[in-house]
Amino acid sequence: MSEDATKENQKKSVLAYQWEYVPTWEPPFFEPTLPSDAPGIQTTHIGDKVVVTPI
């Protein structure tokens, strides 16, 4: 078996382990829009980061 195939199998094993033994885990939910108009909060996008500043 090649090294790449071994790494791929290790990734699959980790995923199977997480799903099997952590049944209450749910993938994080990302809202399509950030609440930039929320009172006292300002969200700013800088590159691939989001900066949240209290106003």
Image (spheres, grey):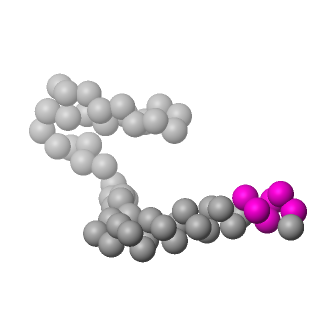
Q: Is residue 48 magenta?
A: no
Q: Nearer the viewer, residue 21 or 40?
A: 21
Q: Main secondary structure of the magenta part?
A: helix
The reply to whether residue 26 is visible in this rendering is no
The reply to whether residue 10 is visible in this rendering is yes
Image quadrant containing the C terminus: top left
Left-right relation of 2 to 37: right
Quadrant for residue 19, please give it.
Answer: bottom left
Q: Which residues are magenta?
A: 2-7
Left-right relation of 24 to 48: left
Q: Nearer the viewer, residue 33 or 17?
A: 17
Quadrant for residue 36, please give it.
Answer: top left
Residue located at (86% from left, 67% from top): 1
Residue located at (33% from left, 54% from top): 33
Q: Nearer the viewer, residue 2 or 46?
A: 2
Q: Position of residue 52 (x, y in %)?
A: 29, 32
Left-right relation of 17 to 39: right
Residue at the left extreme, as displayed: 39
Left-right relation of 38 to 24: left
Q: Position of residue 54 (x, y in %)?
A: 19, 27
Q: Position of residue 15 (x, y in %)?
A: 53, 66
Residue at the right extreme, as displayed: 2
